[in-house]
Image (cartoon, rainbow, N blue to C red):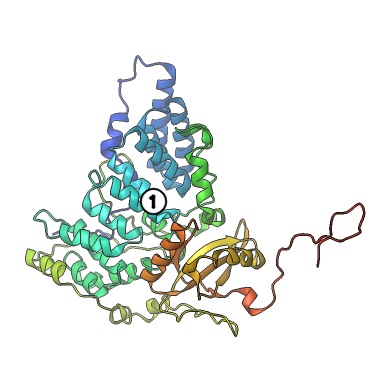
């Protein structure tokens, strides 16, 4: 059996063969009006720009095509592809959302919408999208996307059934293996992966997955899949949205404050990992890029392509899917000291008197990124009113980017499942958060030393010409 699949959601997600074929070059528009011709021309230029790896030009041409013909779903899909390639996940979310309004049965647009939602930290929204379009998204792709959206246990259940089907292929099995890894079932993941991965590559594959399973921000995993760097995204131009002003685009941009402190893409950060294999076979016009820009140190890089023939009896995968048991990854990761070092997360040292639940893992629930620790403290005062954070002590870490220095507010030291549950509860109460691995988080600054707080001017009695003064 031949395979190289690490993931089936990868760069070729950007190539929608079925969706875009109807909008290719040809004489269909010979008698069309000028706006229609211009839209077709701009869409063709956008596609060619994507093919040569020029994401910015693809965005420019794609936006022009939608401007000329806003009702053509294929143009909005192409624009969404360009936004993804440019690392603009907020805009991609809007573009694919509009495409689904025009064509609700477009499963590929739905899958990419879910990816964009995952990238901006809207896991609940991504799961709703995947559920709503379950009939049009292949189960092997939907299962892995569900795992990326924070529900690996459900993904394991879904894909465990899929791999026992007579027509199950290598992509389905590899997605199942990765879902097992994301659920913390490393020995089972290795067993399933071995069905399609060469023995001399198996340990390296598991270590790659281990790094992938520990993102430091909401966008890390999707950015790694697409081989891009997330950038500060102002959102899709309001003029292109289907809805009126005060529309989805503005709401989407406001709903994801995390993206406002993402670093911009830097040319010197380029690496040359091989693109991952995609959910649906790539038959579209956009080729895989050989030189994607990777997001961060936690991004996944891949070994050179090597076709492997490794025939295994069908009962092997059925046995694993039916009888797998949770197993620690320690025995696997211990083989590489350098790889194991990547999983060491600094334990927060809290000031005396701080209340915190015992640490259970290296995952943190990030509540936001703020101008400084004083502003973060005010945000924590509001957040701690939610019972979810009762008994927890806040943590934080400074984060520097080209747009400035920010203070990340978080609570942490949890197992992945516990952190996911806490974040979902907080979101249900109207809060904003996402789960990430520790990134140097320690006790909040105001627990270590007094931090100036923001106060309103105090009223001074008997003062004329002034209503108050600010206390020092």
Q: Is residue 15 visible?
A: no
Q: Is residue 45 left or right of residue 375?
A: left
Which residue shows up at 42% across the image and 32% down it?
45
Q: Nearer the viewer, residue 163 or 263?
A: 163
Residue at far front of view: 462
Which residue shows up at 56% across the image and 65% down it?
408
Q: Position of residue 423 (x, y in %)?
A: 44, 63
Total labels: the figure holds 1
Crowd rating for badge 1 (residues with CA inside 10 Å; few <14, some 14–19, many 20+): some
Q: Is residue 187 visible?
A: yes
Q: Position of residue 187 (x, y in %)?
A: 23, 75
Q: Is residue 444 left or right of residue 46?
A: right
The image quarter containing residue 315 is bottom left
Q: Is residue 315 left or right of residue 107?
A: left
Q: Position of residue 199 (x, y in %)?
A: 20, 72
Q: Which residue is mark 1?
A: 125
Point out the image quarter for the N terminus.
bottom left
Q: Nearer the viewer, residue 205 or 418?
A: 418
Instruction: Identify the secondary structure beneath mark 1.
Output: helix
Q: Position of residue 32 (x, y in %)?
A: 37, 16
Which residue shows up at 32% across the image and 34% down it?
103
The image quarter containing residue 420 is bottom left
The image quarter containing residue 208 is bottom left
């Amino acid at each position: 059996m031949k395979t190289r699949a690490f993931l089936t959601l990868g760069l070729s997600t950007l190539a929608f063969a079925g969706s875009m074929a109807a909008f290719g070059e040809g004489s269909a528009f010979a008698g069309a009006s000028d706006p229609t011709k211009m839209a077709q021309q701009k869409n063709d230029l956008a596609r060619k720009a994507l093919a040569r790896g020029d994401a910015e030009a693809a965005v420019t041409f794609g936006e022009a095509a939608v401007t000329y013909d806003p009702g053509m779903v294929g143009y909005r899909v192409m624009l969404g592809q360009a936004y993804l390639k440019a690392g603009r996940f907020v805009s991609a979310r809007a573009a694919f959302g509009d495409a689904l309004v025009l064509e609700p049965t477009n499963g590929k647009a739905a899958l990419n919408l879910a990816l964009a939602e995952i990238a901006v930290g809207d896991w609940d929204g991504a799961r709703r999208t995947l559920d709503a379009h379950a009939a049009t998204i292949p189960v092997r792709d939907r299962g892995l996307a569900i795992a990326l959206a924070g529900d690996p246990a459900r993904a394991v259940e879904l894909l465990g059934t899929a791999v026992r089907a007579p027509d199950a292929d290598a992509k389905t099995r590899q997605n199942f293996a990765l879902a097992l890894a994301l659920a913390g079932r490393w020995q089972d993941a290795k067993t399933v992966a071995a069905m399609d991965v060469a023995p001399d590559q198996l340990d390296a594959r598991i270590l790659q997955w281990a790094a992938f399973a520990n993102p430091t921000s909401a966008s890390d995993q999707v950015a790694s899949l697409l081989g891009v760097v997330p950038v500060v995204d102002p959102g899709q131009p309001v003029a292109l949205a289907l809805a009126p002003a005060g529309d989805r685009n503005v709401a989407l941009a406001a709903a994801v404050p995390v993206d406002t402190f993402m670093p911009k893409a830097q040319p010197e950060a380029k690496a040359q990992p091989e693109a991952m294999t995609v959910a649906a076979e790539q038959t579209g016009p956009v080729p895989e890029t050989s030189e994607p820009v990777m997001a961060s140190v936690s991004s996944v890089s891949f070994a050179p392509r090597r076709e492997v023939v490794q025939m295994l009896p069908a009962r092997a995968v059925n046995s694993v899917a039916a009888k797998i048991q949770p197993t620690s990854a320690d025995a696997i990761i211990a083989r590489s000291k350098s790889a194991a070092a990547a999983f060491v997360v600094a334990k927060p040292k809290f000031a005396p008197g701080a209340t915190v639940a015992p640490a259970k893992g290296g995952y943190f629930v990030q509540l936001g990124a703020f101008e400084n620790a004083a502003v973060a403290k005010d945000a924590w005062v509001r957040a701690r009113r939610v019972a979810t954070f009762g008994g927890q002590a806040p943590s934080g870490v400074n984060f520097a980017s080209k747009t400035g220095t920010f203070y990340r507010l978080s609570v942490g030291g949890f197992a992945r499942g516990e952190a996911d549950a806490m974040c979902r509860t907080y979101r249900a109460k109207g809060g904003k958060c996402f789960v990430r691995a520790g990134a140097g988080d320690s006790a909040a600054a105001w627990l270590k030393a007094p931090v100036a707080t923001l106060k309103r001017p105090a009223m001074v009695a008997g003062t004329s010409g002034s209503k108050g003064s600010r206390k020092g």
